[in-house]
Image (tube, helix red, strand yellow):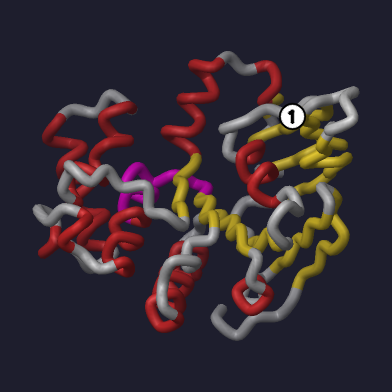
Amino acid sequence: MLIELRDVFKIYGEGLPSEVRALDGVSLRIAAGEFVAIAGASGSGKSTLMNVLGCLDVPSYGDYLLAGRDVGELSDRQLSRIRSRKIGFIFQGYNLIPGLNALENVELPLIYRGLGLSRRRDMALAALERVGLSDRARHRPAEMSGGQQQRVAIARAIAGHPPILMADEPTGALDSRTGLEVLDFLRQLNREGSTVLLITHDNAIAATARRIVRLRDGKIVEDRRQEVDWL
């Protein structure tokens, strides 16, 4: 099993009157190669769940096993290594650095992996070509449309060939047509073997996934598989 959560809690202000249980006893298993939408309204706990799954945060209680390894036993350095090698992140706000061009933005996580200039440049260019932006490699974010910026963000996420892609509201800042193009690309990556976790508040977008995990008040209230027509 690629991802396994066992009775996971994430509690803020524990014991105080203002205590918030962002995750309240979540258990979840996700196999390699799945396309899962993690859905819910604002405040449901879906972003907290993504942060835990992405090793950006740790549970207050419970166990998280990633490819059989207990994440709670790993050092900060080991967690950083997992994030840089195993997980690609795609965010609604793109999170591109304005002063860097597209190529440099895509290269950035490869620098953290310690790759040499020639290799990381080749990998970054290949990723930009994959998303159809090789001709915009020297353009900065402000010189590109929102859809192009999101494709740069996708190129950055896939440049290192991580087995897991986590997309947090990746279409939220885009018009409907461009949003569908981004979803189509995520589906193509899934067909090629990537495990895709799509975090969304939009039921229509969630409905495009093969599996929907729905959260409410930090609890899983629905976990179902469905037939989709894009396979």
Give the answer, above or below, for where 35 lies relative to 26.
below
Disc 1 element: loop
Image location (x, y in percent) of residue 68: 69, 32
Q: Quadrant of the C terminus?
A: bottom right
Question: Which residue is more in the foreground, 127 or 8?
Answer: 8
User: Per the image, is 158 magenta?
Assistant: yes
* Residue segment shown in magenta: 155-164
Image location (x, y in percent) of residue 228: 64, 81
Residue for point 65% across, 71% down: 206
Left or right for 182, reference 41: left
Left or right for 157, reference 87: left
Question: Mark 1 packing: few (<14 Cα in 10 Å), some, or many (20+)?
Answer: many
Image location (x, y in percent) of residue 33: 59, 57
Question: Which residue is more in the foreground, 152 or 131?
Answer: 152
Left or right for 189, reference 103: right
Question: Which residue is more in the foreground, 13 or 187?
Answer: 13
Residue for point 66% across, 25% down: 71
Residue beneath disc 1: 59
Quadrant of the rendered image containing residue 230:
bottom right
Question: Which residue is more in the foreground, 117 or 13?
Answer: 13
Give the answer, above or below, for where 160 lies relative to 189.
above
Three-letter code for the amino acid on which mark 1 is drawn: Pro
Image location (x, y in percent) of residue 134: 15, 61
Give the answer, above or below, for where 127 lies relative to 97.
below
User: Per the image, is 214 magenta?
Assistant: no
Give the answer, above or below, for where 126 lies relative to 203.
above
Residue for point 12% across, 56% down: 139
